[in-house]
Image: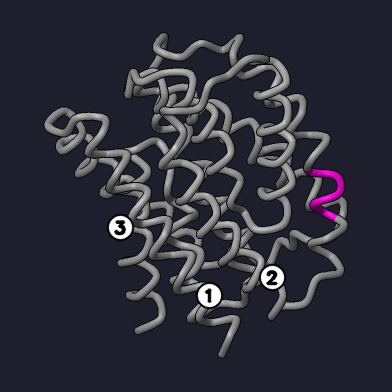
């Protein structure tokens, strides 16, 4: 019972962050949930539940995304998922925690510089980040940072960033879960009571986030999100060291 209550609190905070910034659900939830759930199960847990958030946000932001911008990074992400699934099958629990921590810390540092990035070849930029996103989604469930870096570097419009990320994450999660099932890294027993409860809590987190979203400017949202990413990375890496 206490474990379920803890999961409810984590999911509520993570879904609130996701609604406010367009990213951050898995970044916050993953290191906190690994305290009570096996790391590989947490990866699948966040993929399943974050898919629901993406669906909700797509309904809310209809007509506000530029789908053409997502075609290239999405195609590249599929190529990244394939090697990611292999790594997910062979990597140990301890190494996975350390890898996740490093990814989070590196992401927070890179995204602080995203608005200053000068993009000379947009196509290559989106393809590379899409590939990395797919690889990280399959191995850690944390494919968000590369795409957040990409979208923030291309636009400062918070509605456009949030809407575009929601669509990318939905497509990426569906493909990753499908391929993970056939690669036997996703098992149906992961769809348990905690997942059902988390899906219900997500609606509450989304409702609160929408109330706050209109009152906050994009730089504030970005700083808040990056602070959470850095904290999560340090917490995860600390678990790996100990």
Q: CA distance from mark 1 to mark 2?
A: 11 Å
Closest to the observer, 193 or 33: 33
104 or 174, which is in the foreground?
104
Label whose residue precedes the other's in the sequence (2 or 3): 3
- Image quarter in which the C terminus is found: bottom right
Foreground: disc 1 or disc 2:
2
Viewer-proximal residue among 83 and 110: 110
In which image quadrant can residue 197 be found?
bottom left
> Can you tell which mark lies on residue 13?
3
Left or right of 225, for residue 196: right
Number of the front mark, 2 or 3 = 2
Badge 2 crowding class, 10 Å Cα cut-off, few under 14, some 14 to 19, many 20 or more, is many
Residue at figure coordinates x 51%, y 72% from the top left:
236
Residue 52 location, x and y as percent?
Answer: 48, 41
In what element is the residue under mark 2? helix
Q: Identify the mark at residue 45; answer none if there is no mark.
A: none
Residue designated by label 2: 96
At 52% from the left and 50% from the top, the residue drawn is 107
Q: Secondary structure at mark 1?
A: loop
Quadrant containing the N terminus in the rendered view: bottom left
Q: How is the image coloured?
A: one colour
Q: Residues within 10 Å of mark 1 (few under 14, many from 20)?
A: some
* First of labels 1, 2 by sequence position: 1
Tell me the number on the disc at residue 34: 1
Q: CA distance from mark 1 to mark 3?
A: 16 Å
Would residue 9 be counted in the magenta stretch?
no
Is 214 left, or right, of 192 in this rendering? left
Residue 90 in which image quadrant:
bottom right
Up/down of 224 relative to 89, above or below: above
Residue 92 percent coordinates (x, y): 77, 77
Residue numbers of the magenta segment: 81-85
């Amino acid at each position: 019972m206490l474990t379920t209550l803890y999961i409810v609190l984590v999911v509520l905070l993570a879904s609130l962050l996701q609604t406010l910034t367009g990213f951050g659900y898995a970044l916050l939830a993953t290191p906190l949930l690994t305290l009570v759930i096996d790391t590989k199960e947490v990866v699948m847990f966040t993929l399943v539940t974050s898919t629901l958030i993406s669906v909700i946000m797509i309904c809310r932001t209809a007509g506000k995304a530029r789908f053409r911008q997502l075609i290239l990074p999405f195609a590249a992400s599929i190529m990244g998922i394939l090697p990611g699934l292999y790594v997910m099958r062979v990597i140990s629990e301890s190494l996975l925690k350390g890898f996740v921590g490093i990814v989070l810390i590196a992401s927070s540092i890179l995204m602080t510089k995203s608005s200053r990035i000068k993009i000379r070849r947009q196509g290559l930029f989106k393809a590379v980040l899409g590939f990395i996103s797919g690889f990280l989604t399959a191995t850690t469930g944390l494919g968000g940072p590369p795409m957040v870096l990409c979208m923030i570097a291309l636009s400062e419009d918070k509605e456009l960033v949030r809407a575009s990320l929601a669509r990318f994450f939905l497509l990426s999660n569906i493909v990753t879960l499908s391929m993970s099932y056939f690669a036997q890294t996703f098992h149906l027993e992961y769809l348990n009571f905690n997942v059902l409860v988390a899906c219900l809590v997500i609606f509450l987190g989304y409702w609160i986030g929408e109330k706050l979203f209109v009152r906050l400017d994009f730089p504030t949202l970005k700083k808040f999100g990056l602070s959470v990413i850095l904290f999560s990375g340090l917490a995860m890496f600390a678990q790996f060291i100990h």
